[in-house]
Structure formats: structure tokens, C-alpha cells
Amino acid sequence: MHQFIGGELRAASTGDHHDVIDPSTGEVIDTVELASTADVDAAVAAAAAAFPEWSRATPGERSAVLAKAAALLEERAEDLAQTESRNAGKPIRLAREFDVPGTIDNTAFFSGAARSLEGKASAEYSPDHTSSIRREPIGVVGSIAPWNYPLQMAAWKVLPAIAAGNTIVLKPAEITPLTSVMFAQAFADAGAPAGVVNVVTGRGAEAGAHLMRHQDVGMVSFTGSTAVGRTVLEAAATNAKRVHLELGGKAPFVVHDDADLTAAIHGAVAGSLINTGQDCTAATRAIVHRSVAKDFIEGVAELYAAVRLGPTADEDTDLGPLVSRAHRDKVAGMVERARGYARVVTGGEAPGGDLARGSYYAPTLVAAVPTDSELWRDEVFGPVLAVTTFETDDEAIALANDTVYGLAASVWTRDVYRALRATREIKAGCVWVNDHIPIISEMPHGGYRQSGFGKDMSAYSFEEYTQVKHVMHDITGVAEKEWHRTIFRLR
Ligand code: NAD
């Protein structure tokens, strides 16, 4: 597969390529060219050339392109779902019912939002002047996306950027580039001028790092690990770029003694296994009241045992593979080490038979996990739920906040006061009450603390992708103004 630069598929200049692998079989399904720094330069130049026209397009014109793109994505939904499923190892049900419709809805949302950028009303804040606000795009945005939700992450990066009048160069993860290029193609087909959306398919340390440092890029938007996010911050310092970071997570899942335990058990299974646990908001740390912990652990273990691992193309498959063998081995290694300090209740192994060709790993529940352990503190990014217990509400909140991350959390209780207190005290960009995972185009997604800063989705994302200009008009027509006296003596 080629890259997408200046409105067309373009061969990379390196001649170097990367095999794209279906993680459910280990088979090569495509090859992708690896972008060189020269290809990144070409993409940034195309985006810079497109900026004057696109930034001056009326909101209505930009909205129309986004609406047309949403319709094209709808027409291409099955192709997108099949490609996403094979490239990222997603069960086809997940790709069809979550990734693709979520992307289409987001595109439709930003088609509307493009027409309703807001600012303060013009007014006279001094008797002699009228002040007004212009909300303007920044220029060329350089974006980097991870492999866990390739299509949705491409959408979260591209949509608010271009709806606000910026142009963009997106670098997807090198192992999951296919649907990002299809997404960019939909905008070109919808009438976006050449260069508005560009995709370079190179390696992080080369193409990615070059894009983050590029002097003609005005803003960088990165979703990925906290470790790489730190390097993005440093790179952005080179020309004081605006930075938007969506980083790792280690979401707490707090179950009180008055919770609907059946709901909490179902929520924990769905919240920990979505996308095979490769979700930055996935439930990873179950913090359960001691009096209900035994029932909670038994209930989750029972449902975990019934989860169907299988080929991703099979409608009946619940859980797909991890994204790669290397990642599966990392997850397995963390669970193996945990056997030395905690109790693996169920899972903790890779299935055999036909599935051994892929990078599958069984749903794994680990109880009595010490809160200073690797499994409790570090991102596993796999189908693994760690459990610990608490006695008091204060203890539950302290445990929830005892992490460097702050992306998402949930609290399970029937007590409205307990719920309200938890939503105030927990330091995270999203707190669910009696649910875990749902996202919605109208509401923001973003982190606190080392989960990053800035928001994806919703009108809040325009705060990242626009800059505010104050315009001040003199309304007196007086040449020699009173305030000039402060600076020099009037004749
Ligand atoms: P990663 O940080 O390894 O890679 C992310 C992207 O950065 C890839 O495109 C990669 O090629 C690129 N990259 C790697 N090194 C780079 C460098 N030196 N300079 C520039 N770019 C570089 O993350 P991953 O393993 O692809 O994804 C998993 C991580 O993403 C997890 O930590 C997860 O929590 C996080 N994530 C966060 C959110 C969120 O919204 N906060 C959403 C999805 C994933």
C-alpha cells in the first residue's frame, strides 16, 4: 500500500516496506511502504499548500465535504470493517458495530460542528473600542496515532483539525495503516482539496519523530504511550508548537458494597475485554469492597470462562487476538511474573489448536494483586483484570487515584451521594457511574495527569485545533488620544 499525499496514493521514496500481518493467523495480508523523512517533507508541503484555500473555505463548504465523506464512509462500511478486522485483529462484530459506526457518527458530528465554532460576542470593553474575537485554524497539524483503534484514532485526529480549517499530516502506527489511508481517500473523494488530509506510513522513530520536529508544522497531536508522548513534548519545544497528548491509562473500576453486583460483573467483563483489553480506558484495576469481593471474582471468572476466542471473521467470536505476537508475549510475561505475588484465578495462557497461529491470549483474572506491583501500576494493554479490595470509601478513592494516569474511571454504587463524591474526587478525564466504556461524539475524551492533556471528540476539541485572535477597533476617530499622555506629552 502507498501513502496518501496531496490527494493521491503516492509511492514512498525509500523502497523500504513493512509486512502488514493479520494477528489472528500470522499471515501477511499486505505490504506497506515506509515513509522517509523526504516523504514527510512532501506531505507537510502538500498540507501547507492546501492551507490557504481550506482555511478560507466557509464553514458551510467545509461542512459539506465532511457530510459527503460521512456518506461515503457509510457506503464503504463493510469494506472498512473487514479491513480493520483483519489488520488489527478485531472480531468482525466489534469492527462492524463499534469502530466503523463510531467513525461515521463522528464524521457526521464534525460536519455539523464545523458550522458552530463559538467565541465571545463583540462588545465595548473600553468606551473607545469595539473588541471582537476571531477563532482561527493553526495551520498544518502533524498527528500520530496508535494501533489499537486505527480507524477511530485517524478520525479523532483528522476530523476536528479539518473541520476547524487546518490541514493535516497523519502518521498511523506502521503495523495498522490500512484503514487510515482508506479514511483519507474518502475525504478526497468527497471533494476536499488535494493536501487537506495526508497520510504517511512510516516508522515512529523516523517518520514520526521527523513530523513532530517539523518546522512547518504548527501543532502536534499524539495518541500513544506516555513514554513516546514525552519525546513528542520535547520535539514540539523546537519551534514552540501547540501540543495535544492522549496517552496511557490504567482505569480503576470501583465496586461498592451497595452496587448491583450483576451489573458490575457484566460491566467488568465488557470493560476489561473490549478490543482484547487494548483500550486506553479499559477497566484494568478492580477495586472491590471486601464484603462483595468473593462474589465479584466468582462472577467475573465464570463469564470470562464462557467468552469465545475464535477467528476474527467469525460472527460468533467474542475475543480476538492481541495485535502482534510481540505484544502477546509482553502481556504473557507480565501475568507470569504476577504468579509470584498474586493469584491467577482464571486464564493466564495462550490457547492451542488452530488459534496458536495467531496472537491470542485467554481472558485473565488476577486477584490479591499488591498495589505496588507491576501488574497494578503499569499498562498491560491486554485482556487482564487485576483485583484488590477496600474497606472504606476514602480508601477506595485513594486507591483509584494511586496511579500516574488519569484517563478514565468508573464507580459502581446505588448511593447517589457516594457516586457524586466519587465523581468529584477521582482524578480522571472521564468518570462513569454504573457503566464503563461508552463514548459519544458530543462529549470530550481526554486525560488528566500523565494520561495527557487536550480533548478529542466534541466541540471541546476545537479548543486544541483553533487559536483565538483578539481584534480591537478604535471607534472614536480621535487622532490625539487621552491615553497617549501616559507615553508622551501632547503638544
Ligand atoms: P506507541 O506510543 O508505541 O506508538 C504510538 C504511535 O507513535 C505509533 O504511530 C508509533 O509509530 C509512533 N511513534 C513511536 N515512536 C515514536 C517517536 N519516537 N516519535 C514519534 N512517533 C513515534 O503506542 P502504541 O503501542 O501504538 O499504542 C498503545 C498506547 O496508546 C497505550 O499506551 C495506550 O494507552 C495509548 N492510547 C491512548 C489513547 C488515549 O486516548 N489516551 C487512545 C489509544 C491508545
Image: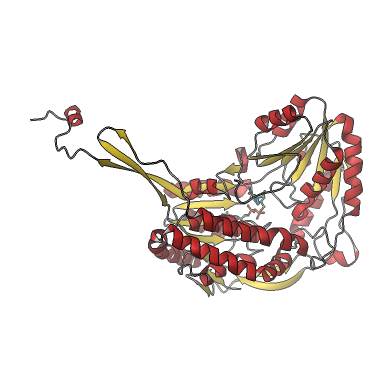
- Residue 313 pos. (x, y %): 79, 68
Vertical order, 183 against 412 (above or below): below
Q: Is residue 468 left or right of residue 75?
A: left
Q: Is residue 40 left or right of residue 134?
A: right
Q: Residue furthest left?
A: 491
Q: Is residue 420 left or right of residue 145?
A: right
Q: Residue at x 59, y 69 (%)?
A: 72
Which quadrant would the C terminus be assigned to in this image?
Answer: top left
Vertical order, 410 against 398 (above or below): below
Q: Is residue 52 left or right of residue 336?
A: left
Q: Residue at x 64, y 56 (%)?
A: 146
Vertical order, 471 against 176 (above or below): above
Residue in front for this viewpoint, 144 or 370: 144
- Residue 310 pos. (x, y %): 85, 63
Residue in front for this viewpoint, 140 or 124: 124
Which quadrant would the N terminus be assigned to in this image?
Answer: bottom right
Q: Residue at x 88, y 39 (%)?
A: 296
Residue 271 visible, this angle:
yes
